[in-house]
Image: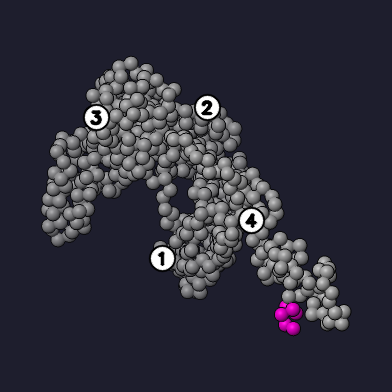
């Protein structure tokens, strides 16, 4: 019998519950040396060519072929040439001062002796748009396979494989060896708190390489092992598709939590998969030089402070935490509170944390040390702000006009990024606040902001217009000072975003009229039990007596009618308008002779009809 319950298994079929289930199956996939791979593929270099991606003199990405020569991102491009004479440096795309578009300048860079081939940082700004564009292509493939994908950065994602492995285990008949548990599931012969049956002995599903198993444990001790195995087959197919379609190699980690999955994806590179089963988590954390500071969000200054607070050893700190506080996070929290109290007893208060914050930190550390820190997925994080900035060397920005030239660059950069987000989110994104910031050589920062008041989508010229106004304000306030110019930095940021659904029609915006969608009798056919069916609408425009095959074309057509009706309400209607009834047509265009009704009228009776059919003149008589 399994140690897991039916509730645990059913929870992974829920996007909201899966991450907290002990049977959770989470994958982290990142693209190996992403920027370098983008340039390698764009320039049609091979994987054996030592490609590095360069920004001015600095290396920002190193291909694995270049790493073999000992080149790292700590090197300058000149240092890299000393290590590898056949180095192939590629400079990032750049914006040029005063232009709102980016472009590549291939075979140009600081390593050239020819001055005409050098890219001046005084006149250019790096653009990361090409990498974001490739990132969207990769993200699209992930989303085709998995219903819950969280973009962690431009080159990495987390995927909740819960629904995928649930389907393979209990629904997909192509997966053999699971008939017994499937029959029990179909018949509903279980309670949520019943334990799952044991794993069949004849399971033949193989883990797609990379099972971290130093203790040589049995491949299928319980159902979590089976689910990880099924998950590994899915991620292998995803990674193969990315390489086949786009040319990028990736690394993957599979585990119960996002934190361990991320560590696992970094364990073997390039182009590898590592599966950390639940039974092997502690071995993985203890034997592979991983420390508390190895987890993302636990590095940097914060990680050092926690290490000092807990007096953690320099090696095997995770094992030390588990052994020192084996029972509960409350033990750890009590220790931390007492230590903080002692450290704050002096003249200077070193920590400003209340008890609740300390306990929250203790809970996280306690769970991280056991590979059990669970976080929900956030497939579409809220956009709070967006910035485009430029550090200005020397005297490159010594006048108001120089500021405007960089605003042109920022406007194009920010609008391009908004459009990318709109494609990714399938929403219309409208920033409501624009801010311009300047920095002087005396480290003084000056800021002005205003509300964006534009109709519809914001365009590059709108940002330029409002940004110019703010720069003028800064100029009038500080431009007369001897310490203001030359500036050492300038930036534009957008914030207070409103996000609207895309695809809204004129009817959605101005008010919906009578629907002209006519459903056929087949639309209301009774559904058979347990069979999913889709309703097909007959999209028909009654005034035009015309049918449409797809809803998009139909919406465009109804927009035309609504726009025509708005126009007619302002400018008057034509006699052949399909928006007029017979009575309205007679009233408006009665100057023409009506058909004879057969009733004799006095020839001397004065006609009251207007010959030009003008409705204004009709009512003004």
In the drawing, what numbered circle is on residue 558? Answer: 4
| C-beta proximity under 8 Å, tags 4 and 1 | no
Can you tell which of label 3 and label 1 is closer to the viewer? 3
Cα distance, mark 2 to mark 1?
A: 48 Å
Q: Is residue 90 above or below residue 559?
A: above
Residue 618 within the segment the image draws in magenta:
yes
Q: Is residue 512 above or below residue 539?
A: below
Closer to the N terminus: mark 2 or mark 4? 2
Residue that sits furthest to the top in the current view: 202
Residue at image coords 27%, 40%: 373
Find the magenta span and give its range.
616-621
The part of the image, by quadrant, that contains residue 294 is: top left
In the drawing, what numbered circle is on residue 613? Answer: none
User: Which residue position is annotated with label 3?
Assistant: 195
Closer to the N terminus: mark 2 or mark 1? 2
User: Which residue position is annotated with label 2?
Assistant: 48
Cα distance, mark 4 to mark 1?
A: 56 Å
Closer to the N terminus: mark 4 or mark 1? 1
Closer to the N terminus: mark 3 or mark 2? 2
Label 1: element kind: loop
Q: Is residue 65 visible?
A: no
User: Which residue position is annotated with label 1?
Assistant: 444
Closer to the N terminus: mark 4 or mark 3? 3
Coordinates of residue 442 in the picture (x, y in percent): 41, 64
| C-beta proximity under 8 Å, tags 4 and 3 | no
Cα distance, mark 4 to mark 3?
A: 57 Å
Can you tell which of label 2 and label 1 is closer to the viewer? 2
Residue at image coords 14%, 61%: 347
């Amino acid at each position: 019998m399994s140690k897991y319950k039916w509730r645990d298994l059913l929870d992974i079929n829920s996007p909201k519950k899966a991450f907290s289930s002990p049977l959770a199956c989470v994958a982290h996939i990142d693209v190996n040396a992403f920027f370098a791979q983008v340039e390698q593929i764009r320039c049609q270099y091979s994987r054996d060519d030592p490609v590095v991606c360069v920004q001015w003199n600095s290396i920002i990405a190193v291909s694995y072929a270049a790493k073999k020569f000992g080149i790292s991102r700590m090197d300058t491009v000149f240092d890299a040439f000393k290590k590898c004479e056949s180095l192939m440096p590629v400079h990032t795309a750049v914006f040029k001062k005063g232009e709102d578009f980016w472009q590549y300048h291939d075979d140009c860079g600081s390593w050239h002796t020819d001055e005409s081939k050098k890219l001046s940082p005084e006149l250019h700004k790096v653009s990361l748009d090409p990498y974001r564009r490739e990132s969207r292509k990769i993200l699209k493939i992930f989303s085709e396979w998995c219903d819950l994908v969280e973009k962690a950065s431009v080159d990495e994602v987390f995927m909740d494989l819960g629904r995928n492995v649930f389907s393979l285990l209990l629904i997909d008949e192509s997966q053999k060896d699971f008939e017994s548990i499937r029959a029990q599931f179909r018949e509903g012969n279980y309670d949520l708190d019943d334990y799952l049956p044991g794993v069949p002995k004849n399971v033949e599903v193989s883990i797609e390489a990379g099972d971290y198993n130093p203790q040589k444990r049995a491949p299928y001790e319980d159902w979590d092992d089976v689910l990880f195995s099924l998950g590994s087959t899915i991620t292998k197919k995803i990674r193969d598709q990315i390489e086949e379609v786009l040319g990028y190699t990736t690394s993957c980690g599979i585990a119960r939590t996002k934190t361990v999955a991320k560590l696992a994806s970094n364990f073997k590179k390039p182009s590898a998969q590592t599966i950390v089963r639940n039974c092997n988590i502690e071995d993985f954390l203890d034997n592979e030089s991983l420390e508390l500071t190895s987890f993302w969000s636990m590095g940097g200054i914060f990680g050092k402070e926690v290490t000092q607070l807990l007096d953690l050893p320099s090696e095997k700190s995770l094992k030390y935490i588990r052994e020192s506080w084996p029972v509960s996070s409350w033990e750890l929290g009590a220790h931390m509170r007492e230590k903080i109290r002692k450290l704050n007893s002096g003249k200077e208060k070193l920590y400003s944390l209340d008890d609740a914050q300390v306990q929250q930190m203790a809970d996280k550390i306690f769970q991280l040390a056991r590979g059990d820190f669970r976080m929900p997925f956030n497939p579409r994080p809220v956009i709070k702000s967006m910035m485009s900035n430029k550090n200005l060397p020397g005297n490159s920005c010594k006048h108001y006009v120089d500021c405007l030239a960089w605003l042109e660059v920022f406007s194009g950069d920010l609008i391009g990024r908004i459009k990318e987000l709109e494609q990714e989110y399938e929403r219309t994104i409208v920033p409501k606040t624009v801010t311009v910031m300047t920095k002087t050589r005396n480290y003084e920062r000056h800021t002005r902001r205003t509300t964006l008041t534009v109709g519809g989508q914001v365009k590059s010229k709108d940002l330029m217009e409002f940004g110019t106004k703010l720069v003028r304000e800064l100029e009038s306030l500080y431009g007369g000072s001897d310490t203001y110019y030359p500036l050492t930095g300038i930036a534009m940021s957008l914030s207070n975003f409103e996000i609207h659904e895309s695809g809204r029609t004129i009817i959605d915006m101005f008010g919906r009229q009578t629907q002209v969608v006519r459903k056929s009798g087949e639309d209301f056919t009774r559904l058979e039990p347990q069979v999913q069916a889709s309703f097909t609408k007959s999209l028909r425009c009654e005034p035009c007596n015309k049918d449409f095959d797809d809803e998009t074309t139909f919406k465009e057509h109804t927009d035309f009618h609504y726009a025509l009706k708005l126009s007619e309400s302002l400018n008057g209607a034509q006699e052949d308008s399909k928006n007029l009834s017979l009575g309205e047509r007679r009233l408006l265009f009665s100057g023409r002779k009506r058909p004879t009704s057969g009733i004799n009228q006095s020839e001397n009776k004065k006609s009251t009809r207007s010959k030009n059919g003008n409705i204004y003149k009709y009512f003004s008589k």
